[in-house]
Amino acid sequence: MHTPPKWQLEVDFRETDRQIAAVVVLRLTDDTELTAHGSATRRGDDPGRAPVAEKIAAATALNDLARRLLRMAGAELGRPAD
């Protein structure tokens, strides 16, 4: 019986005064790593909104990761991914 693969996903955040950046690293079963980035601008006058900016930064990084995975799969199939 085939054992399903397990991938590891890590999301790290870096903050500056008004910018929140997310870095997503996906480790595949064969030790391939894909890294993707996203960011969001936080309103400086409302520090309570930082969790919203983190979600936006993470979402844009995950979207970047999805595009990278599609390109990788397309390359393995010998055709471009949309």
Image (cartoon, rainbow, N blue to C red):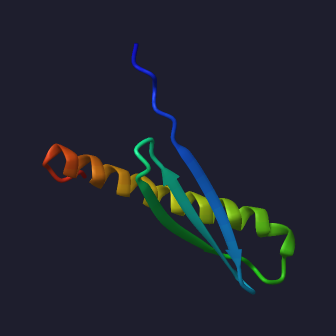
Q: Position of residue 77 (x, y in %)?
A: 17, 43
List the single residue furthest toward the left.
78
On the picture, is 2 further left or further right than 9?
Answer: left
Q: Residue 51, located in which quarter of the rendered image?
A: bottom right
57 is higher (above) or lower (below) than 59: below
Q: Given the current orientation, which residue lies at the most extreme bottom position? A: 17
Percent from the top left, x then y, of residue 40?
Answer: 62, 73
In this rendering, the answer to whether 41 lies above or below 36 is below
* Residue 33 horizontal side relative to residue 57, left or right: left
> Along the line of sight, which residue is nearer the eye, 36 or 39?
36
Looking at the rendered structure, the number of numbered marks drawn on it comes to: 0
Asked if residue 6 lies left or right of residue 82, the reply is: right
Image position, residue 41 (x, y; %)? 65, 78
- Which residue shows up at 40% across the image and 13% down it? 1
Q: Nearer the viewer, residue 47 or 26?
A: 26
Q: Residue furthest top?
A: 1
Residue drawn at point x = 56 percent, y = 45 percent: 8
Q: Position of residue 39 (x, y in %)?
A: 58, 72
Side (left or right) of 58 relative to 6: right
Residue in the image at 36% along x and 57% along y = 68
Q: Residue at x 48, y 64 (%)?
A: 36
